[in-house]
Image (spheres, helix red, strand yellow):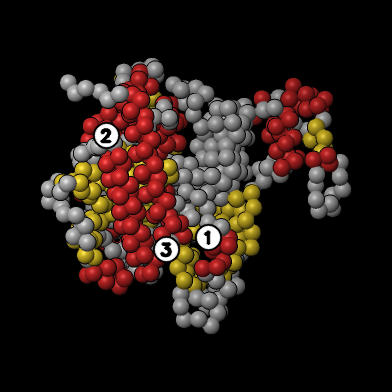
Amino acid sequence: MTARLDPVLIEVLWSRVLSVVNEQQVALQRTAFSTIVRETQDLACGVFDTHGRMMAQSLTGTPGHINAMATGLRHFLHEYPPGSLQPGDVLITNDPWMTAGQINDITVVTPVFKNGREVAYFANTCHAADIGGRILSAEAREVYEEGLRIPIMKLYDQGKINQDLISIVRANVRTPDETVGDLYAQTSCNDVGARALLGFMDEFDLDTVDPLSDEIITRSEEAMREAIREIPNGVHRHETWSDGFEEPILIRATVTIEDQDVFIDFAGSSPESARGINVVFNYTHAYASFAMKAAVSPDIPHNDGAFRPVHVSAPPGSILNCLEPAAVASRHLIGHFLPGVVFGALAEALPDRLMAPGADPIWISIWRGRPPGSDDRFTFSLFQCGGAGARASKDGLNTTGFPSGVAGVPAESLETLTSLVQHRRELRTDSGGIGRFRGGLGQLTEMSCRTDQDWTVSAMVDRISHPPEGLLGAGPGAAGEFKIDGTKEGEPKRLLVLKPATKVQLNLPGGGGYGDPFTRDPEAVLEDVIEGYVSIEAARRDYGVVVEYLGKDDQLVRLPHHYRLDREATHRLRTLK
């Protein structure tokens, strides 16, 4: 049996490993060309040992990227086994079935050499600004329609760029500078991580990181299994619905706890769709395993060991295990539901530890048009977040993506890089699901384009017909809205052609609430009214809390002292419930 490393030394080395991958991430964000990577942070960075096991990830990173990259690295090593690469080699792919589930997500892998042999790998996955084919939507019927698909191959060969590949990419995408620029940034950040790791190894006189990786991964696995053992054995089920494309999609999960292992099975979910909302199994595994770790022990280091006790399955040919050549461009519209359905299944087994469903999937809209008098088209990807679900002891976060973790794009960036105009961006009053703890609020946004020609938008949005549910007697979050000129309902997941004067409204859902709303602290409801989160009418109707407005109706600025909580009326109203 291999001797365990000293715990104090492990803590020191682990902290240094984290600093290395965080340095990798910072380098990526500071050198990236696209706002998707720089500001939205739709990325993942990590370091892997010589067996292809993820040792550590950086501070941020979406589960669909980091967990899919963690399992996907084995495909790289199958294609290029240890010993087959040379210093200066860099690998690349965007094959959906190998990594993150859509061809817009490009993974770049760099081997690290010390004394002439491979000692580690750095990898990152980023959402490309464009990858050709159709404008990103769910309209495709086969993956071949969705853009340029790159098999696992060399981006660099012993330090020399694969110019043929770069030329092919530039010829096939609408944003060649941003897309290729991000590839250079992805390569550079891996180099930054490699240099930091080699310096760290020299400092601690390490010829290999594999023993350290073994220790970190083993400790994470043991901690994860110990957390699972605290849950009583049993079988738990839950299901939810997505709006889908042409018809709603059922997502059904059965979670089985067996001693120190968890089995998550998605049998009974809808079959594979004819449109681009299908999910590859790698992505399904990524979000399901993330959900389980978040539920039972979120503080355990995120690495290969944290995945081992979680076993995920989905029937081949189902919406959550699609087969080639299924269309997959908008797979997040289904995949982001998975943590919510797993939490729903575990709600009774883990009381007071989980959160209600939130507004994810994130809303991604692709805008394309020409500024007045210009022949140059812009293509811009806008990521937006609705409200997060309420937690067992706290309100949900406003306009915060979960489980995606991406950030919003500032209006200043959007309007500087395009001729788009953002007329409104504000919180949606009464959009948070009612409950003892309120769901997070969604947002109201309105966009137009400064142009004298037709322009387009493709909105990958959901939860318009099926809003986020509440938990344990709470109410759902408000449904999303996609409107054209304030009245006409937009067509989600399709490419829409708009006239120059058109205004588009994207009103994102709120998160579900948690617990009985009539048990919410009246003072908290009063504070919600003052902040504009809850209307006076909704406070009375949904919470049984009577708030009086003492100011003038035409006052532009409403201050806290303009509102008064009527405690006696509130008590009477709640007593009548």
Q: Is residue 118 left or right of residue 248?
A: left
- Residue under numbered circle 3: 33
Nearer to us in this view, 62 or 385: 62
Q: Position of residue 542 (x, y in %)?
A: 68, 34
Indicate whether 575 appears above or below 30.
above
Q: As shown in the figure, which amino acid type bears the numbered disc 2?
A: Ser
Residue at 64% across / 52% down in the picture? 426
Foreground disc of the pair 3, 1: 3
Q: Position of residue 25 (x, y in %)?
A: 39, 49
Nearer to us in this view, 43 or 160: 160
Residue at 70% across / 32% down in the picture? 524
Q: Secondary structure at mark 1?
A: loop
User: Which numbered circle lies on residue 490?
Assistant: 1
Residues under labels 3 and 1: Cα distance? 31 Å
Q: As shown in the figure, which amino acid type bears the numbered disc 3?
A: Phe
Evaluate if marks 3 and 2 touch, with contact meaning CB atoms under 8 Å apart: no
- Residue under numbered circle 2: 213
